[in-house]
Amino acid sequence: MKILLVDDHIVVREGVRRLLSGMSGAELHEASTGEEALAMFRDIRPELVLLDLNLTGIGGLELLRRLLNEDEKVRVVVFSMHAEPIYAARALRLGARGYVSKSAGADELVTAVKKVAEGGRYVEREIAGELAFTQLSAEDPLQQLTMREIEILRLLGEGNSLTEIAQTIGVAYKTVANTCSIIKSKLGVERTADLIRVSMEMK
């Protein structure tokens, strides 16, 4: 089975390569950017893609959309630094078959890959429990947020100022301030303090 691993950190790719080397019949290919992954996907046609969300260029969710447009049967497991259920909910709605955070145990990642490779679905146990508890739905206003807006919301919840957020994600301060205004409008709140509260509740 051909597996395409898409992650911009070489240390992560090396670790995953070692983890999956014991899988019978697994043929692992690697890409570090969305553009590289898309080209490689068209060339080798993998049965399974292990996908990070935080990629330069084409972002993880956009890449997920494009891969499924190329081949609706491809099985995608998202392997992300984000353990918040909202990220898992969005990825699963877009068509991912699995979701595992990078804070999960190595055995859980292997289990997810095997389960999805066999045609099933798998969500990290802790995240699955939170998803079931929160019952996120299409009507949830959080589902209206873009990945950039979710990232800014998360950074706010971690105590970052707007200036620090701008530096972290590489945009102008005014862009972050304007985005916060858009988020407030989408969520129906008026103060930045309310955004911080919502961010804390996402965890």
Image (cartoon, rainbow, N blue to C red):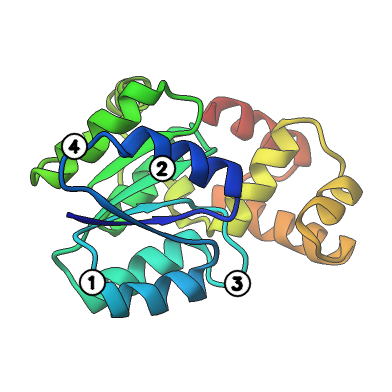
Cα separation between marks 1 and 3: 21 Å
Marks 1 and 2, the one that precedes in the sequence: 2
Q: Position of residue 121 (x, y in %)?
A: 17, 40
**Which quadrant: the N terminus?**
bottom left
Marks 3 and 4, the one that precedes in the sequence: 3
| Badge 2 vs badge 3, beta-carbon distance below 8 Å | no
| Badge 1 vs badge 3, beta-carbon distance below 8 Å | no
Could you say which disc has been placed on residue 64 in the image? none
Marks 2 and 4, the one that precedes in the sequence: 2
Marks 2 and 3, the one that precedes in the sequence: 2
| Badge 4 vs badge 1, beta-carbon distance below 8 Å | no
Marks 1 and 3, the one that precedes in the sequence: 1
Q: What amino acid type is highlighted by mark number 2?
A: Arg
Of badges 2 and 4, nearer the viewer stands 2
Give the labeled residue for mark 2. Answer: 17
Q: What amino acid type is highlighted by mark number 1?
A: Arg
Give the labeled residue for mark 4. Answer: 114
Of badges 1 and 2, nearer the viewer stands 2
Give the labeled residue for mark 1. Answer: 45
Q: For this rendering, which residue is in front, 193 or 97?
A: 97
Q: For this rendering, which residue is in front, 8 or 127?
A: 8
Q: Residues within 10 Å of mark 2 (few under 14, many from 20)?
A: some
User: Which residue does the image show at 36% across and 63% down from the upper left?
Assistant: 64
Cα separation between marks 4 and 1: 18 Å
Q: Secondary structure at mark 3?
A: loop
**Which quadrant: the C terminus?**
top right
Give the labeled residue for mark 3. Answer: 57
User: Which residue does the image show at 57% across and 54% down from the upper left?
Assistant: 54
Q: What amino acid type is highlighted by mark number 3?
A: Gly
Cα separation between marks 1 and 2: 19 Å
User: Which residue does the image show at 53% across and 31% down from the upper left?
Assistant: 202
Q: What amino acid type is highlighted by mark number 4?
A: Lys
